[in-house]
Amino acid sequence: MHHLKKDVYLFRLYYYFITQKKIQLLHKRFLGVDAPTDVLAFDYSNGGRIEGEVFISPKQVRLHAGWYNVAFPKELRRVMVHGLLHLLGWNDKEEREREEMRKREDFCLQLWEARYVSHETCG
């Protein structure tokens, strides 16, 4: 996997960091699940123009970071990438899809971390 999706460009992407209670309300209203989640993505894309909103609950991300024994900033980056991947058309409802999503997350995080490290070390 060398690319995530061809013939698209990022037009508008908004990230909102909201409370656990608010994300639970959105989760229930739009997906019918009355429980908090770490991230919800709302896709308004049109053709190859990617546009959407990603809602993140930092409290839920912090809980997941503890469960997975990873640092909060790394888990937050993963969730941010996860939301973007949904806007690019990737799903994670089935096990096979979750495995593919995780591979794409890892790929994006490697790019993100490589850029951050090279920027910090060269700048």
Image (cartoon, helix red, strand yellow):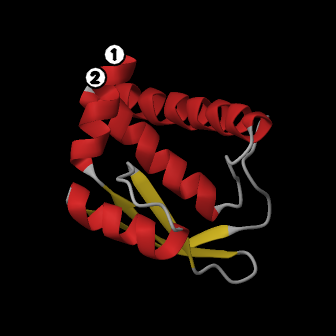
Task: Residue 48: name its quadrant.
Answer: bottom right
Residue 24 is labelled as none
Q: Residue at x 79, y 59 (%)?
A: 6
Quick one: label 2, few (<14), some, or many (20+) residues within 10 Å?
A: few
- Residue 77 in percent (x, y) is at 39, 40
Q: Nearer the viewer, residue 89 or 1?
A: 89
User: Which element carries disc 1, helix, strand or loop?
Assistant: loop
Give amino acid for label 2. Gly
Q: Is residue 13 above or below residue 107?
A: below
3 left or right of 81 in image: right
Q: Which residue is mark 1?
A: 69
Q: State the residue at coordinates (33%, 69%).
A: 25
Visible residue check, residue 18: no
Q: Looking at the image, is 95 positioned above or below residue 40? A: above
- Local packing at callout 1 (Cα closer than 10 Å; few below 14, some 14-19, many 20+) is few
The label number, if any, that marks residue 66 in the structure image: 2
